Image (spheres, rainbow, N blue to C red):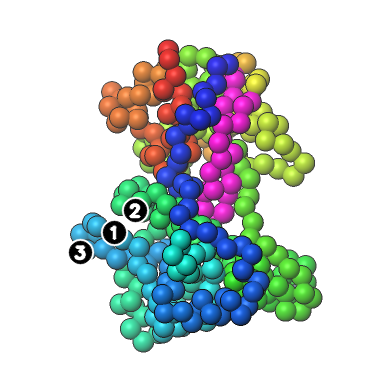
Amino acid sequence: MDTPNRQDFHKPRIGAELTLDRMAEKRADRAWIEQRLANKTSRFLLFVDLSLAVDSDADQDNTKLRWLTAGQIEQLGADLNDTYLLGCNPDGQAIFAASLSEAQASAAPGGKEALKPLVDLRSLAVQGALPDAELSLVGMGRALAAWHVSSKCCGRCGGYTRVNDAGWQRKCRACGQEVYPRSDPAIIVLITDGTRCLLGHHKRYTHKFYSTLAGFVEPGEDFEGCVRREMREETGVTIGQVTYMASQPWPFPHLMMVGCWAQALTTELTLEEEELHDARWFTREEVKMMMEEKHPEGFTVPGPHSIAYALIKSFADQPA
Ligand SMILES: [Zn+2]
């Protein structure tokens, strides 16, 4: 299997390099965090039920990040102690994220109006309105907010937890257990028999949309073992060599996608139909047409915000 050069690999838009410093060494410094919260230049991204408050015109064109002040965040009912430090810009400006439920935010005076419009990160990514670094910053905030939403109670004793370390830890009020933001590993795989690649159509996808196959890493399993097991279960294909290509933080809710190329030793398909509606072998020519939305049967592939696109592109770009 001739794998592409990792240096040439397309960098997905979500997961692109951030332009801010995460300031990890300052998160537990409460006095410093309080100074940043009180500083007039500090700004906040607001997530409401994990959708982002943005600025855009009536047609929802020209979408921009909406930067709120500490005062505006408090007016919407958020406790500044429950906000998360995303980092500092090169000029020292601190960037935080706040997360509210729609019920909380709309109960505040003027809250309903202040929330419009709210956009999900997937839509923002598909629209392509934001620079890559901003899209990645929103992804970081969304993954962190999603972890907080699902970590309000202690997994050990069931007690309530509270935000610690500027959003990078939660601590149980009852037993003191500390928990940290998590990323769940999943593999995503470009399977090739040398001249074709295998793409699947999931039941949850819109019509004629084909993508690389993916699966969750189980306890006690390495990435290569996960690729071989998942691909055998989903497609019946036996996998030989597995090569790591790149990774992508995927904030739905907080996955770490591990992108691999995998060599197919067999090509006959036995689909796990509960999940996978269809899977097919596509030639490079077909894949190029799908990327350009010119396939005669109308088949398409994911957009450039995803590592799925990067894997598919790396196959399409190889010399025939
Ligand atoms: Zn506890």
Q: Which quadrant of the view contains residue 297?
A: top left
The percent coordinates of residue 79 (x first, y second) are: 52, 81
Q: What secondary structure is found at the residue carrying circle 1? A: loop
Q: Is disc 1 surrounded by few (<14), some (14 to 19) or many (20+) residues within 10 Å?
A: some
Q: Which quadrant of the view contains residue 272?
A: top right
**For the residue marked with disc 3, what is the amino acid?**
Ala
Q: Residue furthest front?
A: 91
* In this view, 195 is above or below 222: above
Earlier residue among tags 1 and 2:
1
Residue segment shown in magenta: 242-264
**For the residue marked with disc 1, what is the amino acid?**
Thr
* In this view, 147 is above or below 111: above
Q: Which residue is mark 1?
A: 63
Q: Is disc 2 surrounded by few (<14), some (14 to 19) or many (20+) residues within 10 Å?
A: some
Q: Which residue is mark 2?
A: 130
Q: What secondary structure is found at the residue carrying circle 2? A: loop
The percent coordinates of residue 261 (x first, y second) are: 57, 27
- Residue at 47% across, 17% down: 196
Can you say which quadrant of the picture contains the C terminus? top left
**For the residue marked with disc 2, what is the amino acid?**
Leu
| Main secondary structure found in the magenta portion | strand
Q: Which label sits in the foreground, 3 or 1?
A: 1
**Distance from label 2 to label 3 (Cα)?**
17 Å
